[in-house]
Amino acid sequence: MATTTRPYRGPADLRAMQDLARRVWSHASRFHVGDLAWQRNQHLGREADRPTLLWEDGGRVRAWGWAELPGTLDLLVDPARPELADAVLAWFSGVATAPRLLVTVLEGESHLIAALERAGYTWDTAAYRGVYMSRALADLPPPALPAGFTARPLRGEADLERRVALHRQVWHPSAVTPQSYRNVRAAWPYREDLDWVVEAPDGAFAANCLIWWDADNRVGELEPVGTAPAFRRAGLGRAVCLAAMRALGALGAEEAVVYPVENHPNAEAALPLYRGLGFTPYARTRTYTLVR
């Protein structure tokens, strides 16, 4: 069957890209369906800098490439169609404008690594590494919070401004806005009952954990997680993650995953948090570069 290509056109195509991620998801695959929903929607007005192409046959997406101009690529290729990785890299070479190209893959994506090496890319062992961590959802302890603090899921539009304000404190500087977070909330498979916050006694949101639920693979991804600077070192990040994961487990999920960066100064607090929650590493990313 002939393979065709077409550019990304909007939310329906994001669902098609997520469908590929769902079909091939494993501990050897880089993308969870939640990655795509969050990354595509958290910021506004970036489509011109994100050329994206889909490869299809039989009515299904078999590969996609998502460039971040000037020179970064994310890609997903069905392991049953490894030859499409060469096509994605060739397309990326044509749309990228930087003299140095960067492509990040998971260390278990051997079909992508082989294509990168054929195209002349080399592994940059000094680049930041994402560490992929997993935890079974059995035997989760209850969250423990200081007096006056409450963990709960969001409650619609009334909570939106405080939720965005929290994110912007945690990830300063951040381009997340109320409208972009509305887009996140409208994206599949967002669920408000898995978007948890810790509310301080004065009503401010102090910490958050958003989980994306892949019901087919029975796995939820934590993305993003954070605690406002004024409330750190009080156990709120641990508490909100436990509360959200317990809600995830009640849906029938078997596993939670999270992807912090292990060799970056901003990960100094994240890795101990997730280790303390019982997460263990199962894979790491590799970044490949090509100088043209």
Image (cartoon, grey):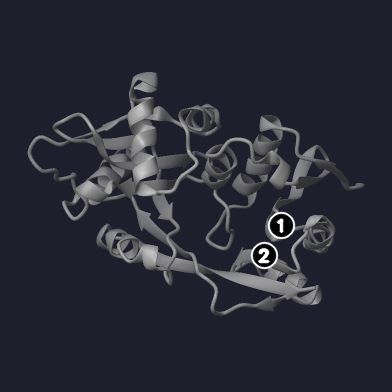
Name the outermost residue toward the left. Answer: 147
Question: Which residue in the protein does label 2 denote?
Answer: 103
Relative vertical location of residue 241 with respect to residue 119 in this rendering, above or below:
above
Kind of residue sitting beneath label 1: Pro
Q: Residue 45 versus residue 65: which sits nearer the camera?
A: 45
- Which badge, 1 or 2, comes first in the chain's sequence? 1
Kind of residue sitting beneath label 2: Val
Residue drawn at 72 percent across, 41 percent down: 48
Residue 42 image position (x, y, % from top left): 52, 39
When asked about the image quadrant of residue 111, the answer is bottom right
Q: Is residue 20 visible?
A: yes
Residue 142 image position (x, y, % from top left): 18, 44
Asked which secondary structure carries label 1, the reply is loop
Disc 1 versus disc 2: nearer the observer: 1
Q: Which mark is residue 70?
A: 1
Asked which secondary structure carries label 2, the reply is strand
* Left/right of residue 169 with respect to residue 213 in the rendered view: left
Relative vertical location of residue 285 with respect to residue 185 in this rendering, above or below:
below
Q: Report, in whole angstroms, how far the alpha carbon at label 1 lies from the one at label 2.
A: 12 Å
Residue drawn at 74 percent across, 73 percent down: 290
Relative vertical location of residue 113 with respect to residue 12 in this rendering, above or below:
below
Packing grade of label 2 (10 A; few <14, some 14-19, many >=20) is many
Residue 182 image position (x, y, % from top left): 49, 27
When asked about the image quadrant of residue 261, the answer is bottom left
Residue drawn at 75 percent across, 75 percent down: 291
- Image label count: 2
Q: Quadrant of the C terminus?
A: bottom right
Q: Which mark is residue 197?
A: none
Relative vertical location of residue 250 with respect to residue 173 in this rendering, above or below:
above
Residue drawn at 69 percent across, 56 percent down: 75
* Left/right of residue 110 with respect to residue 8 in the rendered view: left
